Amino acid sequence: MAKIKERESFRSRLKAVGLRHTLPRERILAYLDRKSIHPTPEELYQGLKKKGYPIGLSTVYLNLQVLRDSGLLWEFKDQKGNTRYDGFGEKHHHLFCLQCGAIEDVLVRELPEFDPEPIRKAVEAKNGWFIEEARLELRGVCPNCQ
Ligand SMILES: [Zn+2]
Ligand SMILES: [Zn+2]
């Protein structure tokens, strides 16, 4: 039952941005919709294979781009310049460890209120950009490295 519900939600998420539902897209979204999961395309490819989902690396790349362009995934670079993907549905910020490179999610709802509104307004007035969202990048040293 949970599985069917899950599939429905990925289907409607894809539909909402005008994308067709395909199995690779669903599997990529399902794989990425977890806390502190930020794979490179290669890591995602290996991870899906390990779960028993055979999928081509080029299919992974292609679908990551499509899903990113539709706003279903967030693409970012880690400190080493690797491109990584984030599909965790809950609003969060990123913690980067400057020593081991670990990337952890910190949920917005577990933090004191952060109001990006004044920053957004200032940037729009000063730079003439239209800002759609604000994310925090917090850099420091993780518990393992301390
Ligand atoms: Zn660390
Ligand atoms: Zn994240």
Image: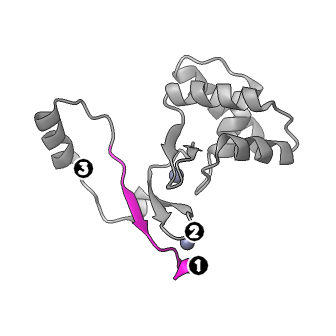
Q: Quick check: 32 left or right of 77?
A: right
- Which label sits in the foreground, 2 or 1? 2
- Answer above or below: position of 69 versus 40: above
Q: Which mark is residue 116?
A: 3
Mark 1 packing: few (<14 Cα in 10 Å), some, or many (20+)?
A: few
The residue under label 2 is which amino acid type? Cys
Spatial CA distance of label 1 from label 3 is: 31 Å
Dot 2 falls on a residue whose secondary structure is loop
Dot 3 falls on a residue whose secondary structure is loop
Q: Which mark is residue 144?
A: 1
Mark before the other along the chain sequence, 3 or 2 = 2
Q: Is mark 2 within 8 Å of ligand 1?
A: yes
Q: Is mark 1 within 8 Å of ligand 1?
A: yes
Query: In this figure, which residue is indicated by the disc labeled 2?
Result: 100
Residue name at image x 16 percent, y 34 percent: 127
Residue name at image x 24 percent, y 30 percent: 130
Spatial CA distance of label 3 from label 2 is: 29 Å
The residue under label 1 is which amino acid type? Asn
Residue name at image x 50 percent, y 46 percent: 77
Mark 3 packing: few (<14 Cα in 10 Å), some, or many (20+)?
A: few
